Structure formats: C-alpha cells, structure tokens
Amino acid sequence: MTTTTQLPILVLGGTGKTGRRVAAQLTRRGLPVRIGSRSAATPFDWTDRSTWAGALDGVGSVYLSFQPDLAVPGAPDDIRAFVRAAAAAGVQRLVLLSGRGEPEAEQCEEMVRRSGIAWTIVRCAWFAQNFSEDYLVDPVRSGEVALPTGDVPEPFVDVDDIADVAVAALTEDGHVGELYELTGPRLLTFADAVAEIGAATGREIAFVPVAVADYAGALAEYDVPAEVVSLLTYLFGTVLDGRNAHVSDGVRRALGREPRDFADFAKAAATQGVWA
C-alpha cells in the first residue's frame, strides 16, 4: 500500500457504474474516500469549476472519471483545467478512466501524462453493464434490443474488472506510468451479447439492427438529452467501425488473472433479477 492512501482518495463519478465500485472497494479496505458528485457532502460538478478546489483540498489520489464521456465536445478543455487544479492542490496520483478508439480520449490521456503527477491510464472497451445498469436495460426487459450496429464485434469488459484495476492502481506500487487497455476475453457482436443474455434469462430477446438516423430519432422521441444522443450516435456510428475489434491483455497485466467473461456477467445479472 502506498503512502498516498493515507490521504483522502477522490473518486469522481463516485455514484456511477465504475466510481461506486471503486469507492466501495476502497471503503471496505478502510481507506479515506471522498465521493466526487454534485450531491456529495463536498460537491463536485464538472460544469462548475468553482467546486473543484474544495473537492481536491487535501486529496492524495484521484480516480478521474469524466461525465458523460471523454469523447464529448469540451472534454479535453475540462480535463486540462482539472489536471492543472489537481497539480496545484498537491495531488500525487491520477488514475484516468479512458475509452478505446476515441481521439478525444487520447488527447485527455496525453494531458494526464504531462501533468507532472504520477499517473495510470485505464482504457476500456464497451461496458458489459451497459446492458444491466444503463440505457439498454429497458430494451432487454421488453424483449427487443434495437441498435445501429451490425456485425462488428466488441470485446465487452466487465465493470468489476475495471474497478479492480483502478483500485490496484490507486493503492499499490508498480502501476505508475502504465496504460492498461481493458477488454473481455473474447469478441462478440451486439447480437451475440443479446443472445447470451437471452440464454442466461431463459427468454427470447430479439436483436434488431437499425439505421443511425432512425436510432437518434427514437432517442429524441423519448426526450433523451441532445448531448447524450450525439454521444451514442458517435460511438455507434463512428467508433464501432472495427477499430476496437481485438482483445487486449490489460486485466492480466494489472491483476495477474484473466478478465471476466460476458457469459458470467449475464448469468450473474440474470440471477440478481436485473432483467425480470
């Protein structure tokens, strides 16, 4: 365990999919955790830079998760400003959650590298838990998942693996200066993933490919915020073009074990009744 863990660890996005898992693990270890969210005791808001200094005060390490995604316009400017604020506050370690195949995310990674702070980058594939904790939950429950993607495969990564790697990077020696690209152990198309969820639940769940424009229109009809629609259409229409259709060894390098398989995720989520 490093000396930085004696100081509070700021977990940005501490109520989100990865952040709450990171915070829970750190808390179980008896480490001081500060949740970075708008509703926290010491609030943090990416859209209000006046909240940053208070959240960073006295912090030794930061789990840096940007909302909604590093690919959105303006993210590099925010990351640049935050990294400067973190350095000025005396932060000693940064662990950045990043995305694969996103030029904007790679710009943000470079800012972290040049920060003068000890860093680790955790660059991730598409989250398996998007099917169980996010915008794909209701379509799975309804029995039909319509997405603007075809046969391009993706090595879905389990969010629990991401949290395990992030916590290791925040609390252990040996991870500074490492870029861990995290994926699952195999490639699946979105249709494959839906089929595996169907097998785990014992239900028939259809996968329906749709055009990007039609998908964006459907999201707008359900009053999904325009910036979220833009992000999702970018990810499906641009990033999911085959550039990430390969598995990586980041989980093994960071943790010395194999990544969790999508089928295991689907069985666990089904057992918990997520899609009931």
Image: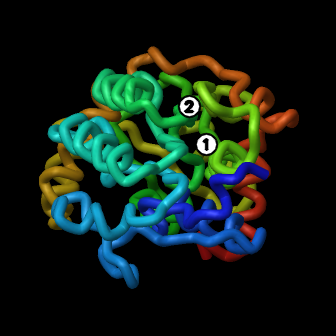
Most extreme residue toward the right is 257
User: Camera-side residue: 46 or 50?
Assistant: 50
State left or right for residue 200 relative to residue 105.
right
Q: On screen, 33 above or below 188?
A: below
Q: Position of residue 241 (x, y in %)?
A: 39, 19
Most extreme residue toward the bottom is 41
What SS does tag 1 mark?
Answer: helix
Type of residue at label 1? Ala
- Determine which of the numbered discs, if any, sits on residue 244 in the image: none
Q: For the point 73% across and 49% down, which residue is it? A: 2
Type of residue at label 2? Thr
Q: For the point 38% across and 23% down, which residue is it? A: 110
What SS does tag 2 mark?
Answer: loop
Q: Position of residue 83 (x, y in %)?
A: 33, 42
Label 1 neighbourhood size at 10 Å, few (<14), some (14-19), many (20+)?
many
State left or right for residue 164 relative to residue 39.
right
Contact between labelled residues 1 and 2, with CB atoms less than 8 Å apart: yes
Q: For the point 36% across and 67% down, which residue is it? A: 55
The residue beneath circle 1 is 193
Label 2 neighbourhood size at 10 Å, few (<14), some (14-19), many (20+)?
some
Alpha-carbon span between mark 2 and mark 1:
6 Å
Q: Quadrant of residue 31?
A: bottom right
Q: On screen, 152 above or below 192?
A: above
The residue beneath circle 2 is 189
Q: Is residue 193 visible?
A: yes
State left or right for residue 227 relative to residue 204.
left
Q: Position of residue 160 (x, y in %)?
A: 68, 54
Q: Position of residue 177 (x, y in %)?
A: 59, 25
Q: For the point 52% across and 45% down, which residue is it? A: 92
